[in-house]
Amino acid sequence: MRTAYSLLGLGLATLLAVPASAGDTSAKKAMVERGRYLIATSGCNDCHTPGYMQKDGKVPESEWLTGESMGWQGPWGTTYAANLRLALSQMTEQQWLARARGAYRPPMPGPSLHAMTDADLRAIYRYVKSLPLKGNPAPAYVPPGGQVATPYFDFTPKNLPKQAAAK
Ligand code: HEC
């Protein structure tokens, strides 16, 4: 009798578990898809994928978010768009939510990440984590006036009106 009940229990559990886990998988897939969509539409590749802007986005997905060794120089020093595959592989999803809402140097569009919902940030995390690890970390930040060993874009403001320059 006991065996019959536990078998029945097992049968029920299996019946219940199968649709639940199938639903789970498609929900997970949908989240990864949404993350991919957010990455593709919010400009992340422009900076975090090598050559993406220069090639008008014609870069295979296998190269996406592997970081850029071309620097961005301005009054803030010289910054490099991180290899997000490597960076996110070092964080838990919870740590990612905190990092995403943290501080960045220009030209990283921090306010865009700050304005995203938890659900969107989690989707981005799931997508980036679904990509294989690839490439090297981007070069380290160089403070203003420091020696820069890589090519870089110059974002130094020029041709400012006299009044602004005098201030
Ligand atoms: C205009 C260029 C640009 C765009 C667009 C951009 N980033 Fe960045 N990102 C950078 C730069 C440069 C840094 C390095 C900033 C620093 O040194 O503080 C950075 C840093 C980061 C970091 C920090 C990595 C770490 O190691 O802590 C994350 C996370 C990040 N970006 C995610 C994104 C996401 C997600 C998007 C799209 C929504 C995006 N970025 C769009 C340029 C950009």
Image (tube, rainbow, N blue to C red):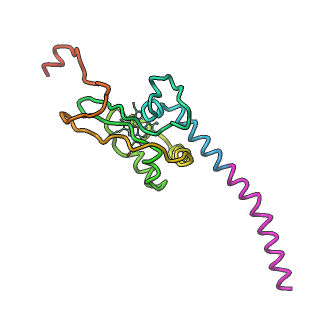
Q: Is residue 5 above or below residue 68?
A: below
Q: Which residues are magenta?
A: 1-26
Q: Is residue 14 above or below residue 64?
A: below
Q: Main secondary structure of the magenta part?
A: helix
Q: Is residue 77 magenta?
A: no
**Quadrant housing the N terminus:** bottom right
At 41% from the left and 44% from the top, the residue drawn is 136
Q: Position of residue 115 (x, y in %)?
A: 45, 39
At 22% from the left and 14% from the top, the residue drawn is 159
Residue in the foreground of this view, choosing between 17 and 156: 156
Residue in the foreground of this view, choosing between 156 and 85: 85
Q: Is residue 12 magenta?
A: yes
**Quadrant housing the C terminus:** top left
Which picture quadrant has residue 150? Answer: top left
At 43% from the left and 54% from the top, the residue drawn is 90
Rendered-image quarter of ligand 1: top left
Q: Position of residue 125 (x, y in %)?
A: 51, 47
Q: Is 23 displayed left or right of 127 in the figure?
A: right
Q: Is residue 118 above or below residue 71?
A: below
